[in-house]
Amino acid sequence: MKAIVQERFGPPDILRLADIDRPEVGADQVLVRVRAAAVNPYDWHMMRGDPFVARLMGPVGLTRPKCRVAGIDAAGQVEAVGSGVRGFKPGDEVLGFCPGSFAEFARTTADLLVPKPASLTFEQAAAVPVGAVTALRGIRTVGRVKAGQRVLVNGAAGGVGTFAVQIAAALDAEVTGVCGTRNVDLVRSLGAAHVVDYTRDDFTDRRTHYDVILDNVGNRPLSRLRQALTPTGILVANGGGSPGHVFGAVGSLLRLMAVNGFVRQQLRPILPAAPAGPAHDDLLAVTALIEAGTLTPVVDRTYSLADTAEGVRHVEHGHARGKAVVTVP
């Protein structure tokens, strides 16, 4: 099969299209014929082995990638199922977390897949798993947003932010989205009652205080973010950081958790959605919102499988509107 592979850590140029063996399916596994795969910040972190501390844990690898094929979000059709799998059969259209999704076929487990809503294209469906699940956890699970609360989403036009604005608005919160000039109309169309253009204004200027802040960017000091919260508000931190850091966002999240024990405000990180926690329940929740017409994926650009490196580079630069998606013929 065709797949995007990497043999070492480095910039997008190390990614190459190659022929590799199709994954074998175990008893509890599902083989998905990938039709589209979204690009996430998770992918360029894995590609670069960044931050360096992450190489000491998880699936990254110390001196070279543990996984030759990157990608985590996918939408496609079930190709084959293991003997122990129930609920899926060949031909079913699905979306979910499929490690190694930058390929014609990817192997995963049934609990990381859900049926694809019929209203979505494969490209739209591939945009859902990491972005929508992270947004759901940030707004509903960690932020515990309620009707009437003031909620601010920093990075409102990004892969997580576009979902977060819609989810918070659906909960009848008063949503403020922070984005650049070219994305103001987009963020407002997603349900934001107010939009802050970060090139002109600073949402931490103390003029407005928020019950919940979802920070997807990590470009403001913790002290400034706390100033924008109500005295008992909740700050939900979703990473941030840039390439080349030894600790990257890990250091920021550790500082946040350390301060949390000494203040009335609640400072909380989001559990990663790539995947972790109750992924199946969260996937069902976001697809239910999509089927109800409450949630719509925003696809910025599409790339061919051969051009995956360009898609990763675009996302790494941090200016994607919604999601960048790789299409697989």
Image (cartoon, rainbow, N blue to C red):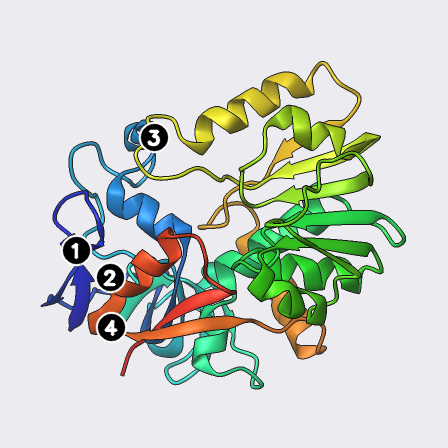
Of the residues under marks 2 and 1, which one precedes in the sequence?
1
**Residue bearing mark 4:** 305
Are circles 3 and 4 on residues that touch, CB within 8 Å? no
**Residue bearing mark 2:** 309
Identity of the residue drawn at 57% across and 50% down: 278
Task: Indicate which disc residue 42 carries.
Answer: none
Of the residues under marks 3 and 4, which one precedes in the sequence?
3
Are circles 2 and 1 on residues that touch, CB within 8 Å? yes
| Measured Cα–Cα span from mark 2 to mark 1 | 7 Å
**Residue bearing mark 1:** 13
**Residue bearing mark 3:** 245
Residue at far right of view: 148
Identity of the residue drawn at 37% across and 82% down: 90
Of the residues under marks 1 and 3, which one precedes in the sequence?
1
Amino acid bearing label 1: Asp
Looking at the picture, how far across and down is residue 328, in whole percent? 29, 78
